[in-house]
Amino acid sequence: MHYSILDLAPVAEGQTARDALANTLDLARHAEDWGYHRYWLAEHHNMPGIASAATAVVVGHVAGGTRRIRVGSGGVMLPNHAPLVIAEQFGTLATLFPGRIDLGLGRAPGTDMATARALRRHMEASYEFPQDVLELIHYLDAPEPQARVRACPGEGTQVPVWILGSSLYGAQLAAYLGLPYAFASHFAPAQLAEAAEVYRSAFRPSVWRDRPHFMMAVGLSAAATDAEAQYLRSSQILSFARLRSGQPGRLPPPQADLSEIAPQVRAGVDQALSCAAVGSPLSVRAALSRLIETYRPDEVMLTGMMHSHAARLTSFRIGAEVMRDLGAMPSEEALPVSAEPDRRIA
């Protein structure tokens, strides 16, 4: 079992998108040394607190600043794009960084509906998702010199394609196509168990995979003590609550008093973010052990936003240490997690 990171390149209050992207690269460099297997970035639009809207560009930024960690999208919202464009983008990335690029695909808009219309021009694209996935894979497959439309660069790169989802739809599609599947349990855990079972039981071996590969995302907020980890996590809770209330913004600093969140909103946020490991190293170990034993993932993707970049580094360092302690496999040439490499924010 590998362990990986999902990053939204959070823009903290008092900082800029440039700061966020520098922090993303710095975290990726540390993650590489701590044995994380993948570093994925998510496509979101019209959100001042997220700097990864141009996902392929940020993937290139991270891949160019690291040496061996796999870098990819978690994910590209395919209905927002023409499959050929994504094939060219990720085919170019795979040409520049061979053997290191992943392409995770989702069908949600990654934004509000007004922005989705600005991106898509027509809203029927989500219904064409399975056909678009197959078209995209075809562009990345073996070259066909006689084809009228070719991805150049792209053809022949065979970038690994993942299906992402938070419902049974993605699980069924990934199983039918024989593709790896990642479930967004870090913000939508309700159907996690059922989706994992559907994917595994319905999986059909394909030219891409001979057996299912199930990855679950887990929220992470780790610190020296339970109290400190809970306090640092308040930034994400408050940001998520504001987003759900139609007030998206930059990631706020942590607050002990979250009474500004209406009780009904807080209940929804707590449920949405319930698939998480929060606390001291011992508490995080207990939570991750329970989740892994319950859902038996082939891979765990950790994610979490903190206002302090230094605190976020500490959180993911603890996460790597705990995952190794639980028997997860670090990537090759990883440093001992207690080691602190000399990294400067680019």
Image (cartoon, helix red, strand yellow):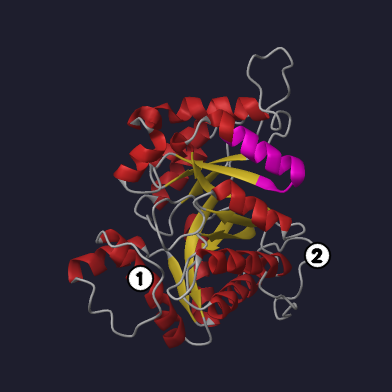
Query: Residue 22 location, x and y as percent?
Result: 61, 67
- The residue at 59%/69% (across/down) is 23
Q: Which residue is mark 2?
A: 333
Please, is residue 314 above or below residue 2 in the view? below
Q: Residues within 10 Å of mark 1 (few under 14, many from 20)?
A: many
Please give left or right for residue 169 compared with residue 346 in the image.
Answer: left
- The residue at 56%/65% (across/down) is 18
Please, is residue 296 above or below residue 121 in the view? below
Q: Earlier in the sequence, mark 1 or mark 2?
A: 1
Q: Secondary structure at mark 2?
A: loop
Q: Residue furthest top?
A: 146
Q: Is 91 covered by the magenta stretch?
A: yes
Query: Residue 149 location, x and y as percent?
Result: 63, 19
Q: Quadrant of residue 162?
A: top right
Query: Residue 304 location, x and y as percent?
Result: 48, 67
Quadrant the N terminus occupies: bottom right
Q: Which residue is mark 1?
A: 237
The secondary structure that most of the magenta stretch takes on is helix
* Residue segment shown in magenta: 86-101
Give the amino acid at mark 2. Glu
Q: Residues within 10 Å of mark 2 (few under 14, many from 20)?
A: few
Marks 1 and 2, Cα distance to the nearest angstrom? 35 Å
The front one of 329 and 135 is 135
- The residue at 46%/71% (across/down) is 12
Q: Is residue 202 visible?
A: no
Q: Quadrant of residue 319?
A: bottom right
Query: Residue 15 location, x and y as percent?
Result: 49, 73
Quadrant the C terminus occupies: bottom right
Q: Secondary structure at mark 1?
A: helix
Disc nearest the viewer among 1 and 2: 1
Task: Using the image, tell me which numbered label, if any, was put on residue 145.
Answer: none
Give the amino acid at mark 1. Ile
